[in-house]
Image (cartoon, grey):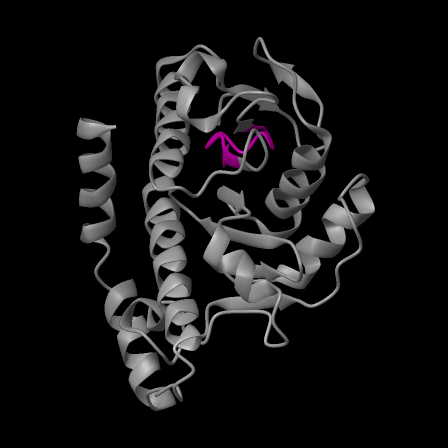
């Protein structure tokens, strides 16, 4: 496949989608200062991907703010700098886990669950949680900031083939082959975590469903992702 130019029509569309996802995440209170990153691999099999830049709030990011980097973390195009931990985490997950879209956040309720001894969401509780049944990985080792390639690669290997990773004492990573599917999962992951934290705060015993029911619900949602496409289209109209 021919290598795509940074300013081509296709890449400009991808940059617009990535910027939209970032602004939507800010609207939905999934952002944290100017930290955290979303990335989207170019479909030309060149090992390059698009990434939000350093120093901008997600709510202000537009398509022309998005930068392009290679699978070694080198910036190739764009008018802004790139934050180093973003390059180490995202390059490793794209390269090792073969994920097209990678969203890393410290969104509050999901991060709160990484601070518990369970380290992650219970996917047998709410219906929103069940969509993630058998799709999670847990990285139980926190080693500080990801300031070198080896730590990014360690996180990627802990994630393996999972779509979602809970990173102990840190945050979460959500991945998909498409940005609309990834954003839909990110949004509903935080909603599921919020419901669990609120339920736990009552002090009442929790009421999980049987594993077979959680498996069924996960397969039902994965088999029909039109809702994810419609959600992202609605965000494009309104954000």
Taking 77 as reference, is 154 above or below it?
below
Relative vertical location of residue 102 with respect to residue 69 in this rendering, above or below: below
Q: Whole-percent x and y of residue 217? A: 27, 75
**Image side of residue 151 versus residue 109, left or right:** right
Side (left or right) of 187 relative to 109: left
Q: Quadrant of residue 148?
A: top right
Residue at image location 64% in from the left, 76% down from the top: 117
Occupied quadrant, residue 49:
top right
Of the pair 175 and 2, the residue shown nearer to us? 175
Residue 41 percent coordinates (x, y)? 51, 34
Residue 109 inside the magenta-drawn segment: no
* Residue sitting at x 45%, y 10%: 7
Residue lying at 32% horizontally and 49% vertically, measured from the top left: 184
- Give the magenta range: 38-49
| Residue depicted at 67% across the width and 54% down the height | 156
Furthest-front residue in view?
Answer: 202
Asked if the magenta segment contains residue 44, the reply would be yes
> Which quarter of the image is occupied by the C terminus?
top left
Q: Viewer-proximal residue, 91 or 52? A: 52
Residue 145 appears at what percent x and percent y? 76, 44
Counting labels gives 0
List x then y, in percent, for residue 147: 80, 39
Q: Nearer the viewer, residue 205 or 155?
A: 205
């Amino acid at each position: 496949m021919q290598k795509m130019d940074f300013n081509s029509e296709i890449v400009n569309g991808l940059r617009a989608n990535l910027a939209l996802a970032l602004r939507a995440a800010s609207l939905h209170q999934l952002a944290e200062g100017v930290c955290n990153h979303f990335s989207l691999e170019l479909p030309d099999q060149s090992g390059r991907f698009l990434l939000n830049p350093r120093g901008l709030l997600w709510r202000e990011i537009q398509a022309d703010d998005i930068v392009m980097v290679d699978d070694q973390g080198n910036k190739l195009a764009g008018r802004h700098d790139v934050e180093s931990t973003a390059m180490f985490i995202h390059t490793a997950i794209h390269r090792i886990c073969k994920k097209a879209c990678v969203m890393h956040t410290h969104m509050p309720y999901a991060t709160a669950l990484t601070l518990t001894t369970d380290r992650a969401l219970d996917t047998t509780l709410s219906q929103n949680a069940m969509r993630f049944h058998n799709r999670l990985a847990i990285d139980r080792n926190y080693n500080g900031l990801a300031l070198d390639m080896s730590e990014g690669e360690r996180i990627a290997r802990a994630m393996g083939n999972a779509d979602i990773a809970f990173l102990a004492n840190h945050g979460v990573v959500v991945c998909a082959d498409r940005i609309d599917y990834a954003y839909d999962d990110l949004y509903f992951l935080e909603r599921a975590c919020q419901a669990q934290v609120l339920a736990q705060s009552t002090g009442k015993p929790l009421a999980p469903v049987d594993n077979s029911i959680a498996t069924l619900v996960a397969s039902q949602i994965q088999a029909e992702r039109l809702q994810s496409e419609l959600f992202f289209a609605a965000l494009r109209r309104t954000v």
